[in-house]
Amino acid sequence: MKKLLLSLLAVSALAFTTQAQTEKGNFMVGGDVEFNSNKTDGDPKSDINFTVIPSVGYFIAKDIAVGTGIGYQFSKTYSYATINPTTGFSNKTNTFVVSPFVRGYKGINDQFKFFGQLSVPMQFGNTKLGDVNGDNFTKVSKNNNVGVALSPGFAFFPSKKFGIEFSVNGISYNNHNFEDGNGNDDGGSKNFSIGANFFAPKIGVQFYL
């Protein structure tokens, strides 16, 4: 009888800790942080890419959250002459990112839920060219991008305050606009994509408060 009572208490505790992550009034906090450095054999310096985009969402109703991601992306790359790697140029890009979203969950049970996220990613940045040493940069272009994306995913909640997510790209549309260093229109592009690669999902985490 004592073992049965302890088992029931353990199950009750587990149920308590895994419910209510997506209840009205809760917050979810996550984001994207990436850094990579790549150096080709024979090149004097490494290419660098850095991204930090924290995001916050608020549940306006059970299983429905609205929020936004706000962050920054930076890259610095080098192009060297094949014969003489001491000649060439460098390229630096700075981008400000804003990505409002709305997300809806559909629960299988308290620990496993599917979700769909509609977002409007916006990027505003500029590109500068410098010398081979990564100095003396001059602004050569300005680029803006506004898009719409619908992404499906799956969330696992091992505890009340923590979730592990697996998501894929679904449907997306992007409108790119470019300007030269003097602010003149320099063309643009439009891109529409549909399809999901389930063999290469994005993996992330969210904290629920």
Image (cartoon, grey):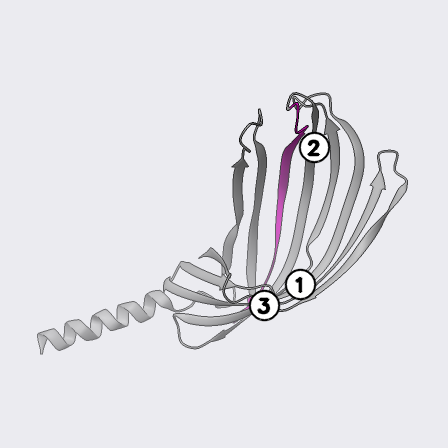
Where are the magenta residues, as a range?
Answer: 60-84
Question: Residue at 48% of width from left, 56% of height from top?
Answer: 204
Q: Which residue is mark 2?
A: 91
How much space separates mark 3 and mark 2, taking CA atoms?
32 Å
Residue 96 is one of the magenta-drawn residues:
no
Gap between marks 1 and 2, in whole Å? 29 Å
Badge nearest the viewer, 1 or 3: 3
Q: Which residue is mark 1?
A: 149
Q: What is the x, y in percent for residue 48? A: 58, 35
Q: Three-letter amino acid code at disc 3?
A: Ala
How many numbered badges does the structure rendering display? 3
Q: Which mark is residue 196?
A: 3
Q: Amino acid at mark 2?
A: Asn
Image quarter of the C terminus: bottom left
The answer to whether residue 69 is left or right of residue 191 is left
Q: CA distance from mark 1 to mark 3?
A: 12 Å
Q: Is residue 23 left or right of residue 110?
A: right
- SS for tag 3? loop
Where is 9 relative to 144, above or below?
below
